[in-house]
Image (cartoon, rainbow, N blue to C red):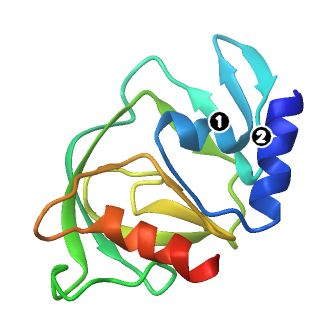
């Protein structure tokens, strides 16, 4: 409990963070699995729900939105799209209609079938696993983002 509270406090105070899949679920309000609900960090206003079948699996294509928090490098895809992959048995329920998403899903499922990459303060958290490729320099973009706010 103290670790979850510490993470919540640091993220609320502007600590930059990036989370994929299990990290996204951990940052939600709660996680329910086999009928048992457990409290999570609570920085993402939604509830993770484990399902019997995959909710998203395979290769995805994501395109950055205006809410994407990191500066894109010149070597990123000109239209902001890139490939990634997902494999998750979870979904996120009870998301606010005011949730900001960093990505539109052009192929795949992501968080809600249309979007992935929840942006909350300096946090970016999604189901899709990004790869560092010629079209997606996300790691260096994230490092530059961290440097710019410190």
Q: Whole-percent x and y of residue 60?
A: 22, 53
The earlier-in-sequence mark between 2 and 1 is 1
Q: How many marks?
A: 2
Q: Residue at x 32, y 83 (%)?
A: 72
Q: Residue at x 81, y 62 (%)?
A: 12
According to the image, label 2 marks what residue?
41
Q: Does 64 appear above or below 33?
A: below
Q: Is residue 81 left or right of residue 101?
A: left
Front residue of this view, candidates 107 and 3: 3
Q: Are marks 2 and 1 in contact (CB under 8 Å)?
A: yes
The local secondary structure at tag 2 comes to loop
Picture quadrant where residue 106 is located: bottom left
Q: Quadrant of the C terminus?
A: bottom right
Q: Whole-percent x and y of residue 40?
A: 76, 33
Q: Is residue 103 left or right of residue 38?
A: left
Q: Residue at x 46, y 87 (%)?
A: 66
Front residue of this view, candidates 120 and 11: 11
């Amino acid at each position: 409990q103290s670790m979850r509270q510490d993470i919540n406090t640091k993220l609320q105070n502007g600590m930059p963070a990036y989370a994929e899949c299990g990290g996204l679920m951990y940052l939600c309000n709660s996680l329910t699995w086999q009928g048992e609900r457990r409290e999570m960090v609570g920085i993402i206003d939604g509830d993770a729900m484990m399902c019997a079948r995959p909710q998203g699996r395979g290769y995805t294509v994501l395109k950055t939105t205006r809410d994407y928090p990191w500066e894109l490098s010149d070597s990123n895809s000109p239209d902001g799209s890139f490939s990634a992959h997902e494999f998750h048995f979870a979904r996120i329920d009870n998301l606010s209609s005011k949730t900001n998403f960093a990505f539109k899903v052009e192929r795949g499922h992501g968080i809600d079938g249309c979007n992935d990459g929840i942006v909350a303060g300096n946090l970016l958290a999604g189901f899709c696993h990004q790869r560092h490729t010629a079209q997606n320099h996300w790691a260096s973009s994230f490092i530059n983002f961290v440097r710019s706010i410190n």
